[in-house]
Image (cartoon, rainbow, N blue to C red):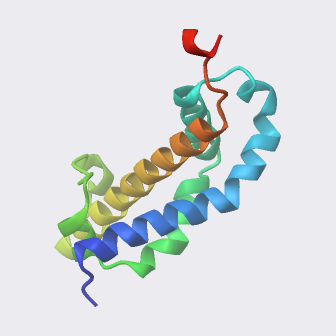
């Protein structure tokens, strides 16, 4: 079933939110001492390192990938994977396309997660005082 670009982006955003809903609380509980001394970029980087360490996103992707068609991903991704080493040894073009689609979708979802984390973090940061506030 083909999906539109709009539906693809919407699904990526939903999957990113689902991932955050599933893992963010555990991340914060496990890394609170580090988070107390970070800015928005560091927060996102810490989350990426944490979830990559034991393959949380990759494992999660394995279960959500089947909701997409490889062709849709390749048509609509904003992060088309080009690292040929990820499909090295594959000879069937369908398997190569599926590999490209998987890694591209993973990057699309990570980018959406990162945007959502930046929004979340900026909503919790105290505003800096300006001269007008004083």
Asked whether 24 or 50 is in front, the reply is 24
Query: Relative to residue 71, is residue 112 drawn left or right?
Result: right
The residue at the point 66 percent across, 61 percent down is: 21
The residue at the point 59 percent across, 45 percent down is: 120
Query: Relative to residue 66, is residue 87 drawn left or right?
Result: left
Query: Relative to residue 38, is residue 103 drawn left or right?
Result: left
Instruction: Quadrant for the N terminus, please.
Output: bottom left
Asked whether 108 or 86 is in front, the reply is 108
Residue 72, quarter of the rendered image: bottom left
Instruction: Quadrant for the C terminus, please.
Output: top right
Q: Where is residue 104 in the image (x, y as percent from the top left)?
A: 32, 57
Query: Relative to residue 51, is residue 36 drawn left or right?
Result: right
Q: How many discs mark residues in the rendered view? A: 0
Q: Where is residue 30 in the image (x, y as percent from the top left)?
A: 80, 40
The residue at the point 23 percent across, 68 percent down is: 97
The residue at the point 41 percent across, 48 percent down is: 111
Q: Position of residue 36 (x, y in %)?
A: 75, 25
Looking at the image, is 19 positioned above or below residue 123?
below
């Amino acid at each position: 079933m083909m999906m539109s670009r709009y539906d693809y982006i919407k699904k990526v955003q939903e999957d990113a939110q689902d991932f955050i809903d599933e893992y963010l609380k555990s991340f914060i509980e496990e890394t609170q001492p580090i988070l107390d001394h970070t800015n928005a970029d560091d927060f996102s980087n810490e989350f990426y390192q944490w979830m990559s360490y034991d393959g949380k996103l990759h494992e999660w992707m394995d279960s959500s990938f089947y909701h997409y068609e490889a062709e849709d991903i390749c048509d609509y991704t904003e992060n088309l994977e080009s690292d040929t080493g990820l499909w090295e040894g594959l000879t069937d073009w369908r398997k190569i396309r599926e590999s490209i689609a998987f890694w591209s979708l993973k990057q699309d979802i990570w980018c959406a997660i990162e945007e959502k984390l930046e929004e979340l973090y900026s909503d919790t940061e105290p505003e800096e005082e300006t001269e007008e506030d004083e």
